[in-house]
Image: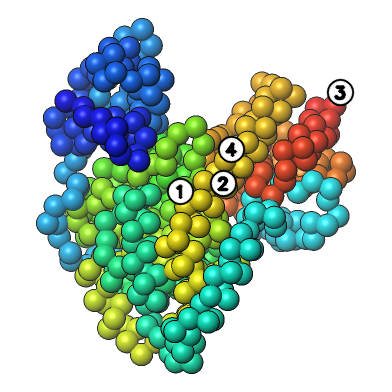
Amino acid sequence: MIYINHDSKKPIYLQIYEQIRSAILSGALSEGDKLASMRVLAKTLNVARNTVEYAYAQLCLEGFVLNKPGAGFFVLSVDNRSLPSSGNRTEGVGVTFNRDQSIPEDLLAYIYEESQQYQYDFGFTSIPDGLFPYSAWGKLYNDVLKSADRHKMNVYNDKQGDAELRKEIARHLSFSRGVRCCFEQIVLCCGMQYSLDLICMLLSNSVTSFAIEEPANDRIRTVITNNRYNLIPVPVESDGINVNALERSGAHAVFVTPSHQFPTGVLMSIQKRMQLLEWAAGKNAIIVEDDYDSELRYHSAPVPSLQSFDGSDRVVYMGSFSKALSPDLRISYLVLPPWLLAKYHETYARYRPTIPWLQQRVLFRFIKEGYLERHIRKLCNLNEKKHDALVRVIEELMGDKVRIHGKNAGSHVVLEFAGGEEQKWLIGRAKEFGVKVYPTAPFWYNEENCPKNTLLIGYSTLDQEKIIQGITLLSKAWFGGL
């Protein structure tokens, strides 16, 4: 039975979604069971039909339920053996594999060349200048400098980071991502690459091979190879990493982006998540979950983290404030399983903190006083409008000449060109019209496997008017007319 708490601040559709999801995970609803129709459930609960529709859409998005047109909504198979339990906390062992591969120099030069020469830059790594909450940040900064705690600027503080900030991050992650942890498990770091560098160091005595999604963020790939691991690329399918291929690889650690795979935009299904957790538990392997832009979802609720399903302490959770607040803050965080936390304290016993206390303290106040929640809500609303404008104008002007991948989340999409146009030609033509777009080739370990007819298009830094103008020019550059 579904119970609606009308006094709760949680939206009604989320209450419905969470209770059905819990019933599926607990086994109360089994594979093949048919859910009540949207009309019937809406009438039973005395809520609007579109409220139930939103809940069912979220369940379908995450792979819990299948919509069979004309027949209804049916529960899909979910292997829940990896759900939270006592679990094992033993370490993994490793094997050998593969080699590193560099990115073509011409693509690197193009990616990092100055953007001022372009009238429209569809970048995906920055945020618009006017969006940062300068006024609130400045006020809190001054408040901290006048506070009784300001003496902490003159001493070396906790190597894990400010305890009060870690408590706020733990609360935030529990509410927004379903992450299960205490603040003692959180380690603050100066950016995602440093976070991964720390993980690589902790695993160096027990793991020799490290799997990564193919394609994946080239900066993450660089960190792993710099730590002298044997890097194993594992293909990404339409619902996430190929777990069967991962198992055959012999790797005992894997880096994944399950909530919004980079760069494809794929969402890992619940079936794949359970399969991946089962692999990790059975192999005593480690999953590094990068939740880099998880809160940026449009037209659906954020998807719970992989860590929230982990019952064997095999997931290391990574996050940062780069996408939600500012990349220049250089504040990221790790949630370490208890057994790995003990190893962290042993290995880094003599280390100092990597982030200034003043910056941590301002962020603590920013979260605690509700600024972060309001800022994320504003960011999502703004990005949703940009995303919708981008998708709309691409569909209007380019029609079936392109296919859009990775919609409704993050700050970029991938375009696939039906006519087989190759990215080097596409980039060259865009440049002639003063528009910068981005190749997908650098994100592939084996570049020969990269679909040559794809491009990455970001939309976070341009306003809606410039997005429309830029896409209009791209359509003219690639397909003529207008």
Q: Amino acid at mark 3?
A: Gly
Q: Which residue is mark 3?
A: 481
Residue 454 x/y as whole percent: 64, 38
Q: Amino acid at mark 2?
A: Lys
* Nearer to us: label 2 or label 3: 2
247 left or right, relative to 339: right
93 left or right, relative to 386: left
Q: Which residue is mark 2?
A: 378
* Nearer to us: label 3 or label 4: 4
Q: Amino acid at mark 4?
A: Glu
Residue 341 x/y as whole percent: 27, 73
Q: Earlier in the sequence, mark 2 or mark 3?
A: 2
Q: Tell whether label 2 touches label 4 (CB within 8 Å).
A: no
Q: Tell whether label 1 touches label 3 (CB within 8 Å).
A: no
Q: Earlier in the sequence, mark 4 or mark 1?
A: 1
Q: Which residue is mark 1?
A: 294
Identity of the residue drawn at 26% across and 34% down: 5
Viewer can see residue 272: no
Q: Tell whether label 1 touches label 2 (CB within 8 Å).
A: no
